[in-house]
Amino acid sequence: MVVEKSRIRQFFKSLSNQKTLMLMSLPFLVWVIVFKYLPLWGWLIAFQRYRLGKGLFDQTWVGLENFRMLFQDHHFYRVLRNTLVMSSLNLVLGFVTAITLALLLNELRRVYFKRTVQTISYLPHFVSWVVAANIVQETLAPEGIINNLLLKLNIIERPILWLGVGEYFWGILAVAEVWKNVGWNTIIYLAAITTIDPTQYEAAQIDGASRFRRMWHITLPGIRPVIVLLLIMNLGHILESGFEPQYLLGNSMNIEYSENLDIFVLKYGIQLNNYGLATAAGIFKTVVSFIFIISANHIAKRLGQSRLY
Amino acid sequence: MYNSFCIPFYTESAYNTLFSMERGQKMRRRHWLRIGLIAMLTASLIFAGCSRGAKENGAGTGNGTGTTGTASGDDKSPVTFTYFAFGSNIDKLASETRIGQILKEQTGVDWKMEFVVGDPAIKAGVMISGGEYPDVISPVSEYAKLVDAGAFIPLNDLIEQHGPNIMRVYGPYLDKMKHEDGNIYILPFTANVGGYISDPNPVTNFWIQRRVLKEFGYPKIKTLDQYFELIEKFHEKYPVIDGKETIGFGIYAGDAAQYYTITNPPMHLAGYPNDGNVLVDLETHEAKLYQGTELEKRWLKALHDLYNKGLLDPESFTANGDQFMAKITSGRMLGFAAYIWQIGDAINNLKTAGNDDLQYVSLPIVFDEDITDAYVDPPSFVNNRGLGISVSAKDPVRIIKYWDNLLKEENQKLTTWGEPGVTYEVDENGRFYMTEEQLRKRNDNDFRREYGFAYFEYEWPRYGNNSVYEDGNAHWPFYQPEVARVNYTEGDKELLKAWGVETFADLYATPVERPWYPAWSIEKPQGSPEAMFSQQANDLMMLYYPKMVLAPEGQFEAVWEEYMREFGKLNAAGYEEFMTRKVRDRVAGKW
């Protein structure tokens, strides 16, 4: 009883100590509840033949029909494959390039040059995909810069229709994503690097560690917790490979490779007013994300790394 | 020197097809991408040579009196209603336009006009979920959804009690306007009144560069083979133009939303009008898909052969709208397939540039000599595009009275011709005509918005485009022969002379009556197997067309067979049965 009481007192004590932090996180808590938990009851739509304009309980219930439709469509598996491949590519390349760039930027001594590189590299992030896709299309056009360059260097004889070859699509998308997001993604790593105690570098320098060694043995381990944490969180988005770039760069020649889950849902769910199917796909995505996050976290725990919870 | 081609962009048939989601499989529901394209197109139209008149004309709208007719209603206290349209335009207050101002003086009613931005399907969904609607809505492609959700009030009694003019205009069409439940929810835009006048300058989706025709002495071309042959001959003679390779033939099919550009031609080439994805037999009224038929095969094989001769631009499947239009204006492309509303500003730019050689002319091309073309739309009534009053409307009676007043003949003249002496002239015989200057302004997008033509000539209860006034003048100014004549450039005249015709319409066959037309406006129930079929069939075309067309020589058949196997898995028979039933219902008067 006494123990219990002191615990409660302890709780309120730390609560009042951290009230600023609590206040700061309050809006986000509200946000999560309103936008992530409250809409969950809409999952009921997945089990209905939903028609707009009628109440949720006046709809026809169809059991698991929407899920059956989803999993029986042979189209669905192609789309799922594309989604997984594209998001894995994004994940891997996104991490590797962002960390590499952060490490390199950190080694730069001239602030002016560093700032310039940083600004240039994260400018594309602020360009909307509609514009970015146009830039990509122009670059890859038969008379675009890439083809011109390759022709001049005699590497190819005839211009290649880059967006017309399905097999190239994943690669093109991965490169475009890197170009667009690498600068932005480095910010968090650069922030993490600043938390590393500079005395470690000094000590290493005195011990004769080269720059590369310092990077490898101090910087990288220093930001490892951040990397692992981000990796776990991003694995939760494994079924979200983006929507706009695939939608904008996709055409009939690369559709076998460009169509992903989101486009599938748009076409067969929202455009055909098949909201049940769209919701079923959403639930499927959530379940997969859940499995990925939990297992990634579990593995991190096993390996003794930092983790989400 | 103005743009005749601004016109078709705004004509009804173009508009309808543009916004038909019925073409479900051919024309997917529009997305913001398309809206963006249209915005760009419109913007470019403004810059593309329509622009000179705008500034000079601003002053012209300030004078004139607004006393054309009196409102039938008793209440003329000022009121502002809300108007929402799923068409594309720029938001405006009606009274900020000359036409809106005149109508306001007559009735006291003003409108806050808003237009959809972004995906219409999503916007409609949001409206329905919220349950709050603007007073009046032009649902365009969202008709079925909004009616299903009970967004509109029935107009049957209202128009009978308060709409003598509405009854005059729509009376003959009332049966076609009734929804399945017997109620009328919208007043369509295509009710033709008093006689029938057709477009003196129809266009098709097959275009050829004028210098190609000139080079070979303006031959008359009727079949697809002749068309491709001529292109081939010219290409052989001039393989390089301005240091760049000549492109034989291109199709605007790089944008998923524009894919119908490549899937529709078999229908046109076989001598059928745009009935969506089916061909309807004139006698039996049976609706048959042309996907998976010899007609489709013949079209694709022709493209395949063209590609293997190096004449078809493979970029047809990847180029976006800007890239495609750049090709058109570059002068390197000898022929192409695209609809006027997709490429209007490229055509305009060429016209403004003034080099007749580089301009294009469209031709009524068919598969064989003995096929009668059907590029000119038959008299038709599109019953799923119109303006309706929503359940949230505060004063439906007042709105009906406003519409009734709008449908008076003198006000209809106001919405398309404007004011005599200002935007058009009347000769001693009472015929309406326009001076070159007036016509240029009529085509100028800035002026059209400022004066209100851009708002009131469409997406309101109105006379159909083919209507004729009691005094014999055409309702749609561009169908008036006096206006059409002013519209021709020197190059146009030369072409007409060489072919020995008065207007371009003389090159086309007279449309045959098709009481069901257009079949694309048959609404498929939401979430139905038919809607699903359309989507799946379209996906299949997306996947296989490039494979067939770009197949190496000799491999066409193999891919075609694979395509047919996949197509066989879809329930085409069920879809055809549904369409046949609906077409026959229409023929029997049940719309």
Image: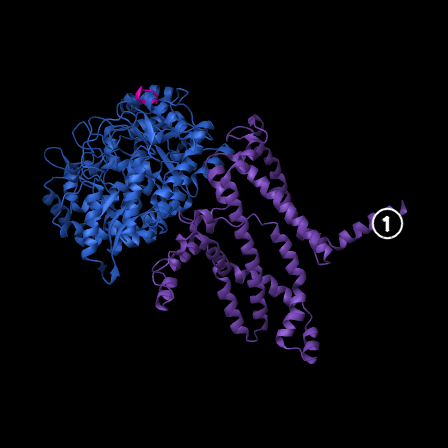
Determine the colour of chain A: purple
| Residue under the point 51% across and 30% down | A51
Magenta stretch containing residue B588, yes or no? yes
Determine the colour of chain B: blue
Numbered-mark total? 1
Question: In the figure, residue B439 lies in which quadrant?
Answer: top left
Magenta stretch containing residue A222, yes or no? no
| Residue under the point 89% across and 44% down | A1
- Rendered position, A268 above or below A127: above
The percent coordinates of residue A290 (x first, y second) are 64, 45
Left or right of A275 in this view: B534: left
| Residue under the point 14% across and 34% down | B431
Q: Nearer the viewer, residue B526 or B244?
A: B244
The percent coordinates of residue B318 (x first, y second) are 37, 51
The percent coordinates of residue B185 (x first, y second) are 39, 26
View extreme (right): residue? A2
The percent coordinates of residue A49 (x first, y second) are 53, 29
Which colour scheme appears in the figure?
by chain
Asked if residue B28 shows in the view, the reply is no
Left or right of B227 in this view: A167: right
Asked if residue B370 shows in the view, the reply is yes
- The magenta span reads B585-591
Could you say whether the residue bearing mark 1 is in a helix, strand or loop?
Answer: helix
Q: Nearer the viewer, residue B515 or B450?
A: B515
Circle 1: residue type: Ser
Left or right of B389 in this view: A243: right
The residue pinned by badge 1 equals A6
Image mark 1: chain? A
Q: Neighbour class for label 1 at 10 Å: few (<14), some, many (≥20)?
A: few
